Image: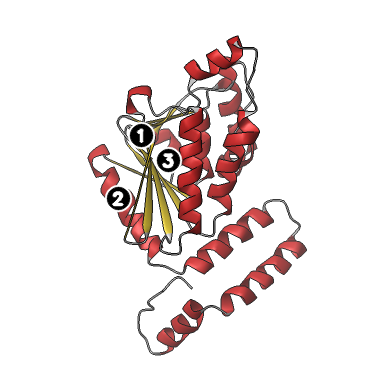
Amino acid sequence: MNDVLYSVGDGVAAITFNRPEAMNSLTLRAKAALLDALTRAAQDPAVRAVLLTGAGRAFCAGQDLAEHAASLDAGQGLNDTVRAHYNPIVRTITEMNKPVVAAVNGVAAGAGASLAFACDLRIASEKARFAMAFTGIGLAPDSGASWTLQRLIGPARAAELLLLGEPLNAARALELGVVSRVVPAAELDAAARELAVRLAQGPTSAYGATKRALAFAAGASLPDALDQEAALQDECARTDDHVNATRAFLRKERPVFEGH
C-alpha cells in the first residue's frame, strides 16, 4: 500500500495520507513519500492548487511513535527527522507558488496539526479534532507550529494550546479561527474539492505572490512590506492573467485565468 496517494484532476493535486490503520501517522517512508508528492505538485505546471487530506478517520496523527520509540531505544534520539523531513515538508507547502487546502477529516495531532496549519486554507469535518500533543510526550513543537499557530489565533491562545496540549474540537477550532469552515463529515470531500477547484481556476501567479507577500510581511516593517508589495505587483502585472483579466473587466466579462 502506498503511504501517500497522489492524483491530479481539474488542475488540483490531491495528496492523501494513506496509513488509516495507524491514524495516518508518519514513518520515515511516509514522510519521504509526502515530500515527494508535494514537490511533484509544486513543480507540475498542470497543477494549480493542492488538496491535502487523510484516509479513514484521521487527518494525520503526527509522528509514528512506534518508529520513534525504536529510534530512542537504539540511542538515535530524534534521528534528525525534524531538520531532514518535517522542515522541508513545511517549507514546500508554504513556499510553493500555489494555494494548498487542508481538508481535515478527523484527528490532526502533533506534526499532523502543524502540517494543517502550514496550509493556506483549512476546511474541517465536524468530526475534526486538533491536538498539539508535543508537551504530552515531553517535546517542544515542530513543523512550524510555533510560527503558524500564533499567526492564526494570536500568541496568548497559541501558548495555551501548545503548553497544555488540550484538544480542540471542530466548533472551537472554527471559533478561534484555526479553520475557516466546518461541514458535516459526509460533505467534506465535496466541499474541499469544490474549494480546491475554484482556486485551480484562479490567477495562480497572483495566489503565489500573495503567499509570498504574507510570509514576508509577517517579519517585516511596514515600509519593507510596502516595497515587497510593489515588487510583487510589478511581477503580477506582467502576467497574461492580469492583462487578460483587465481587458475582460473593461468588456464587463468574467475573466478566464490560465495560470500564467
User: Which dot marks residue 18?
Assistant: 1
> Which residue is denoted by mark 3 in the rendering?
174
Q: Nearer the viewer, residue 127 or 13?
A: 13
User: Which dot marks residue 118?
Assistant: none
C-alpha distance separating marks 3 and 1: 26 Å
Is the Cβ of the residue at disc 3 closer than 8 Å to that at disc 1? no
Count of labels in the image: 3
Q: From this view, report whether residue 86 is shown above or below residue 181.
A: above
Secondary structure, mark 1, is: loop
* Residue most extreme to the bottom: 251
Q: From this view, report whether residue 93 is shown above or below residue 246.
A: above
User: Which dot marks residue 191?
Assistant: 2
- Image x and y of residue 212, in percent: 61, 59
Q: Amino acid at mark 1?
A: Asn
Give the mark toward the camera: 2 or 1. Answer: 1
Residue lying at 44% horizontally and 27% vertically, measured from the top left: 25
Q: Nearer the viewer, residue 167 or 55?
A: 55
- Image x and y of residue 110, in percent: 52, 27
- Image x and y of residue 204, in percent: 48, 66
In primary-sequence order, the first of circles 2 and 1 is: 1
Give the mark toward the camera: 2 or 3. Answer: 2
Secondary structure, mark 2, is: helix
Q: From this view, report whether residue 220 is shown above or below residue 87.
A: below
User: Quick one: quadrant of the N terminus?
Assistant: top left
Label 1: few (<14), some or many (≥20) within 10 Å? many
Q: Amino acid at mark 3?
A: Leu
In primary-sequence order, the first of circles 3 and 1 is: 1
C-alpha distance separating marks 2 and 3: 16 Å
Q: Nearer the viewer, residue 68 or 166?
A: 68
C-alpha distance separating marks 2 and 1: 20 Å
